[in-house]
Image (tube, grey):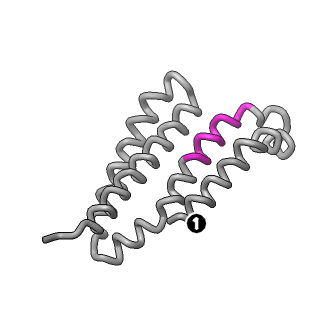
Amino acid sequence: MLASSAAALAILAVVALIGEPMLKLVGGKSFGSAYPVLLWLAAAGCFDLATVSLDTVLTAVNRAGTVFAIRVVGVVLLFIGAFALMPLYGSSGVAMGVAIGSVAVAILLGFAAANLTRSRP
């Protein structure tokens, strides 16, 4: 998980540093306004990348139902966040909703994996 977290941070740093100029270079100046959306979606993807191993671990120890339930909660929170933030922030609000769902999934997967490592008497 440490390697995937480091990769996620590196990717987010690259997007934060050169994302806007790259969008303008590839798509023209009009695409520069999409930078906030790109940043939120990159952050969401980085949370998913950082916790990708937890899905596999939980599934390997016969906790696929837990992973499914966590993913359902993430999708529900994504929709709630997107619908709540879209009227205020437009497409950036939807991207924020995606980030909210990804953060929630990362936290819940972390708790589920930590629960497996606790010693039981």
Location of residue 94 with respect to 5 vertically, above or below: above
**Relative to 82, residue 98 above or below:** below
- Residue 2 x/y as whole percent: 53, 64
Residue 53 coordinates in the image, percent (x, y): 46, 68
Q: Amino acid at mark 1?
A: Ala
Q: Position of residue 46 (x, y in %)?
A: 57, 53
Q: Would you say 28 lies left or right of 117 here?
A: right
Q: Residue at x 28, y 75 (%)?
A: 62
Question: Can residue 65 be spotted in the picture?
Answer: no
Q: Give coordinates of residue 120: x percent, y percent.
A: 17, 70
For residue 115: magenta? no
Q: Determine the image quadrant of residue 35.
A: top right
**For the point 33% across and 64% down, which residue is it?**
113
Q: Is residue 48 above or below residue 116?
A: above
Residue 64, quarter of the rendered image: bottom left
Residue at the image position 50 percent from the left and 56 percent from the top? 48
Q: Dot 1 lies on which element?
A: helix
Is 40 colored magenta in this rendering?
Answer: yes
The quarter in which the C terminus is drawn is bottom left
Quarter of the view holding residue 78: top left
Looking at the image, how many numbered discs can be counted on the residues?
1
Disc 1 target residue = 3
Q: Main secondary structure of the magenta part?
A: helix
Q: What crowding class fits label 1: few (fewer than 14 Cα within 10 Å), some (14-19), or many (20 or more)?
A: few
| Range shown magenta | 33-43
Residue 21 seen in the figure: yes
Q: Residue furthest top?
A: 88
